[in-house]
């Protein structure tokens, strides 16, 4: 998107890190990719098909750079979702509701 059509106010930082998605009614985490991160939200690609406004917990793992980095644990709310060309893969935009640790 060019700057004229971009509606998000916050700068997006490209990441490509793994993210664990903990759904409220499941014991198994869904693993996906955190495409980018901003002050208020993230873009995630995964096999999970969320409902609009669904709230769940995530853990964004730090890049493999070494060092004392901790995962970002947060509660997020789904704001958009669409299927990608690769069958069974979805991209969702989520808003950070609460930082857990």
Image (spheres, rainbow, N blue to C red):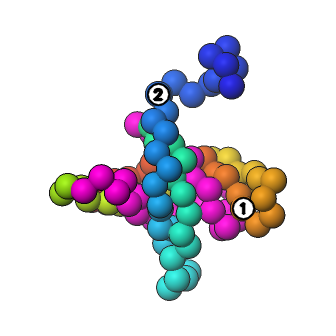
Query: Mark 2 falls on what kind of element?
Result: loop
Residue holding disc 2: 11
**100 vs 68, nearest the viewer:** 68
Q: Residue 1, how many percent across, how many down? A: 68, 25
- The magenta-colored residue range is 39-66
Find the distance from the CA under tag 2 to the CA under tag 1: 25 Å
Q: Position of residue 88 (x, y in %)?
A: 76, 66
Tell whether 92 sits left or right of 59.
right
Quadrant of the image containing the C terminus: bottom left
Measuring 54% from the left and 57% from the top, which residue is drawn there?
A: 33
Question: Is 85 contained in the magenta span?
Answer: no
Q: Determine crowd level at label 2: few under 14, some 14-19, many 20+ residues with C-alpha closer than 10 A.
A: few
x and y percentages locating residue 25 in the rendered image: 56, 81
Judge whether residue 32 can be spotted in this image: yes
Instruction: Please tell me the numbered disc located at residue 89.
Output: 1
Name the disc covering residue 30, or none. none
């Amino acid at each position: 998107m060019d700057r004229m059509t971009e509606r998000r106010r916050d700068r997006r930082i490209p990441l490509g890190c793994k993210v664990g998605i903990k759904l409220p009614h499941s014991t198994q985490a869904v693993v996906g990719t955190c495409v980018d991160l901003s002050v208020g939200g993230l873009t995630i690609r995964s096999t999970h098909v969320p409902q609009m406004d669904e709230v769940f917990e995530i853990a964004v793992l730090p890049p493999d750079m070494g060092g004392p980095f901790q995962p970002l644990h947060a509660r997020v709310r789904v704001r958009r979702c669409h299927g990608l060309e690769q069958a069974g893969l979805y991209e969702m935009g989520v808003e950070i509701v609460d930082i857990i640790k």
